[in-house]
Image (tube, rainbow, N blue to C red):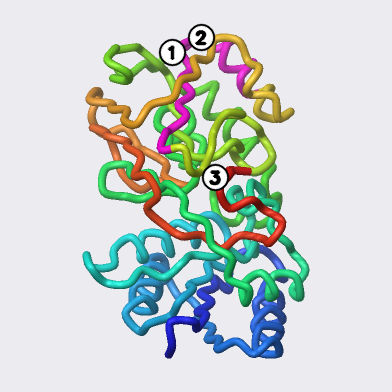
Amino acid sequence: MTGRGILIIHNPQAGGGRRRIVEDVHQACVALGAEVESRATRCPGDAETLAREGAGEGFGTVVAAGGDGTVNEVLNGLMGVAPGAARPAMALLPAGTVNVLAAELELPREPAASAAMLVAGRRRRIDVGRANDRFFVSCAGVGADAAAVARVSLPLKRMVGRGAYAAAAVHALALEAGRLFGVEVGGQRVEASALLATNIKRYAGPCLVAPAALLDDGLLDVVLARSGGRAAWFRYGLHLLFGTLRDAPGLMHLQTRRVTVADPPGLPVQVDGDIRTHTPLAIEIIPAALELVVPAAMPVAEAP
């Protein structure tokens, strides 16, 4: 396999009726003259292993075809490439319940357009976040945010899609009200009931939470909820449902390269939409860590 080859890693369980998308894109890439191989995951963690193996086999581009979970696994597989070894570019093919980064990049959904983007291979170098030992491309969170993620079952996600996240968030926000933890950021310590460290503007699909966030500015955009009362969290939940969380009162917005949560220990931490680690927590940004395949219409030197 040459360094120009494309490996498509897909989750056959992601998003109803999306398996055909992978097949159509594969065939369209072949028709355009590309070397393409598709490999399906069978269980959690497979995409990470397949991505790392694909890098070792010399693929030039590894495509994450699925939801945010598949994207995160492929990312961690690529970031796990041995120092000094060639790291393929990552590409996305939206085929899951929630595709936050795909929405951020406004990626094409038509198979022909997706294939043209993959074969053209236009690359842009982006930052990658790290929460403890888990890499992320979109966001990591602790507190009510992670509690919402923990309450979303896979069957519920398949039935109602993005609405599952919003419904679980409202429930979690009410249950987590008043539970505070200590955050160290920018040389100060603050008490918060939720923390979201993001590399992109959107959260849970269409909700705009960090308008200043850029994929390539070397910074994390951090949103802290400092109000812990049930009334405040009810308002946050409504803002989340209506996509206006960035305008909710009681939120603290800042940019930093590193943020930590030392206590209490054992709090779940969501990383790109799945619970991946627990407090104590250190979140940091790794500038220009990965090449991402982007549409031809997107400026390479600027974030979306």
Query: In terms of sequence position, does the residue under pointer 1 or pointer 2 come before the other?
Result: 1
The numbered dot on residue 229 is 2
- Magenta stretch, residue numbers: 218-237
Residue type of the residue flagged with mark 3: Val
Q: Residues within 10 Å of mark 1 (few under 14, many from 20)?
A: some
In the image shown, does 164 or 39 lie closer to the viewer? Answer: 39
The residue under the point 74% across, 64% down is 109
Using the numbered discs, state the Cα–Cα distance from disc 1 to disc 3 in whole angstroms.
21 Å
Question: Quadrant where the C terminus lies?
Answer: top right
The residue under the point 32% across, 36% down is 283
In the image shown, does 203 or 237 lie closer to the viewer? Answer: 203
Q: Is residue 87 above or below residue 248?
A: below
Relative to 194, 169 lies left or right: right
* Res. 13 image quadrant: bottom right
The residue under the point 64% across, 24% down is 245
Q: Is residue 19 above or below residue 289?
A: below
Residue type of the residue flagged with mark 2: Gly
Q: Residue 44: image x %, image y %?
A: 41, 65
Using the numbered discs, state the Cα–Cα distance from disc 1 to disc 2 in whole angstroms.
5 Å
Q: Residue 79: image x %, image y %?
A: 33, 60
